[in-house]
Structure formats: C-alpha cells, structure tokens
Image: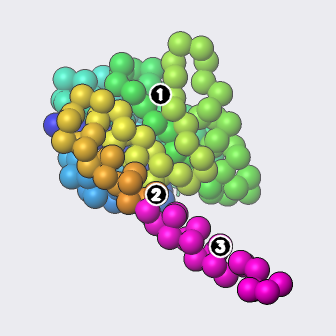
Amino acid sequence: MKKVGIVMGSASDVPVMDGAVEVLREFAVPVEVRVLSAHRTPDDALRFAREALDRGFGVLVAGAGGAAHLAGVLAAATPVPVVGVPIAVGELGGLDALLAMVQMPSGVPVATVGVNGARNAGLLAVRILALHDVELAKALDEARAAMATKVRAADDEVRARYAPAEGR
Ligand code: RP5
C-alpha cells in the first residue's frame, strides 16, 4: 500500500495534525510523520517533496499556521497530491493560513481543508488511496455506512424527543 506523509511546519502543530495520523491509523494506512518548515528548513522540505514519489508516498498531508507556505512549497516540488491543513495560530485565528494555502497559483493545486481540519485531510488521503486499493475502498464504505447509521440513530432520537404528544 502507498504511504501518506504527514508533514507540519512546527512541533507546535502536532496536537492538530494528530487528527490526520489517527484517522490513517484507523484505516491501517502507513504514515511517516515529519516536522519540515518551508521557512526554517526549506532544503529539507524540498528534498522530502522531490523524493516523495520514489519513496512510495501516494498523498502528502501538510499542516502549517500563519504564513503557511509549506503545502504550496511541497506541491511545487512533487506530482504527489498535497492536502493542506491550515492551522489556527496567532492573532488571525487560522484565516491567514487558510488563505495562504487555498489561493495557490493556477497549475500548482493544494486540496485545502478547513481550519484545523486534519481529520478530514486524513479522510481525503484515504479516499485518494482507495481509488486503487480494493481493501481500503471496502473499509471506507464500511466507515461511511457506520457514520450514516449513527446519524440515523440521532435522527430517530431527536424526532422522538420533539414528536407532538398524542392527542395534541
Ligand atoms: C508555522 O508557524 C508552523 O506551522 C506553526 O503553525 C506556526 C508557529 O510555529 P512555532 O513558532 O510554534 O514553531 O510555521
């Protein structure tokens, strides 16, 4: 199975990015987790991106906050799809990172999830890998069915709670 690279700009991003690691572990997808900074260790980040395809990565998930250039820099240096996770740090609450990631120039896409949306980034990586992996596709279908079952149970409970009393 292809690996997923979980890359973040700082160790301070770990509590958020752990959401992506967790979901990939739930699906038994192999991960490599790294701290690589577009600004503080640019050579290391570029080397990682340039080697990603040959090293068996199918998706890279990149999280950063503030002037968040990591996902874009990785995407510039690899054909492997990059999912960006804008992280809420500092005065602007993640809007800075969101805009930095989502407003990529034409030709260099980053699939950006919501602010702190690491779990969805992990799920998007699973969906991408599942296109070429029958077992993973089956596990994804089962997880989606389980999610639907939970929502239907909540629907039943809420409908019962607000159902008009008999005779009214
Ligand atoms: C970004 O700056 C990192 O991704 C992190 O979200 C933010 C703050 O980093 P630290 O100052 O905590 O290392 O590059």
Q: How many marks?
A: 3
Q: Position of residue 37 (x, y in %)?
A: 44, 41
- The residue tagged 3 is 159
Identify which residue, 79 or 40, lies in the foreground: 79
Residue furthest toward the top?
107
Asked whether the viewer can see residue 16, the reply is yes
Q: Is residue 58 above or below residue 61?
A: above
Between discs 3 and 1, the one toward the N terminus: 1
Q: CA distance from mark 3 to mark 2?
A: 16 Å
Q: Is residue 159 magenta?
A: yes
Q: Mark 3: which secondary structure?
A: helix
Q: Position of residue 149 (x, y in %)?
A: 43, 62
The residue at label 2 has a CB less than 8 Å from ligand 1: no
As drawn, 89 above or below 161: above
Q: Nearer the viewer, mark 3 or mark 1?
A: 3
Residue 148, numbered circle: 2
Task: Give residue 49's quadrant in the image.
Answer: top left
Q: Nearer the viewer, residue 156 or 104?
A: 156
Q: Is residue 3 left or right of residue 86?
A: left
Which residues make up the magenta segment? 149-168
Q: Is residue 64 left or right of residue 140?
A: right
For badge 2, the amino acid type reads: Ala
Can I make out residue 65 in this image?
no
Tell me the tag on residue 135.
none
Kind of element beneath mark 1? helix
Q: As shown in the figure, which amino acid type bears the numbered disc 3?
A: Arg
**Cα distance, mark 2 to mark 1?**
37 Å
Name the residue: 53% across, 51% down.
Answer: 117
